[in-house]
Amino acid sequence: MLAVPYFEKALYELPDAELSAAAIQALADEVETRIQGGPGGRPLLSVPHLLSDEASCYYHGYVLAEMAVHQTRAFFAARDGVIVDNPRVGPTLRDAYWRPGNSEPFLGLVERLTGKPLTGDSWVATLQQPVDELLEEERAAYAAAAKAANGAAAKAAVDLDMRVTLVDGDEVIADTTEEGDFLAACKKFEGHIRQRFPRAAAA
């Protein structure tokens, strides 16, 4: 991801007299080697944003967004310990990011929510984490979330204030009106899937 805006910047800085297909290809190879350590699985020149004038100087926005996601996740992890099924996350995102919308600069939104200017530190920390350690953390987090979800499902029904029908073509598999509850409809749908695809469900 990071190589694309670096290549685009270098391309626009290339003097007109030096522009040629060979020079552009060589520049792409140089950026891939400098940023990624070698050719990537997807060549830079295959990225459509570089080939479309309406998407010029655009791709760096993905990099900034990825930085903001990791910094925001790190903030929630430090403040609350968990993100999934955390009732504090939604209101925080609503008030800090969604409600202001385009009325405030992007960098200001991130700093206001996380308490610090946007940096790549949280993203880099994620990339530097050993795979085995990451997998162990993810397994533990999943187990804890599953345990909490099972307890919550036993305690309360889910009221979406709407009718939900789960269908496959003309077949109505489950209907919250008939099942009486969203979770009951989900349970019936789960049974349908397990019956229709027994081997996939078992795996």
Image (tube, rainbow, N blue to C red):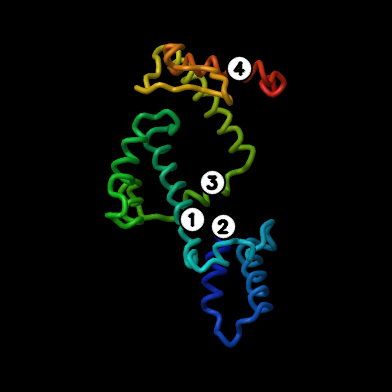
Disc 1 element: helix
State the separation of the CA atoms marked 4 and 2. Answer: 40 Å
The nearer-to-camera label among 1 and 3 is 1
The answer to whether the residue labelled 3 contacts the one labelled 4, judged by CB atoms less than 8 Å apart, is no
> Which residue was labeled with disc 4?
192
Q: Are marks 1 and 2 in contact (CB under 8 Å)?
A: yes
Tell me the amino acid under the disc marked 3: Thr
Q: Residue at x 52, y 65 (%)?
A: 5
First-in-chain label (1 vs 4): 1
Foreground: disc 4 or disc 2: 4
Instruction: Give coordinates of residue 191: x percent, y percent.
Output: 59, 15
From the viewer's perspective, tell me whether residue 38 is left or right of residue 49. Answer: right
Label 2 sits on residue? 1
Mark in the foreground, 1 or 4: 4
Amino acid carrying label 1: it is: Tyr
Disc 1 and disc 3: Cα gap in Å?
17 Å
Residue 102 is situated, as x and y percent measured from the top left of the image, at 31, 54
- Disc 4 residue type? His
Residue under label 3: 126
Q: CA distance from mark 1 to mark 2?
A: 8 Å
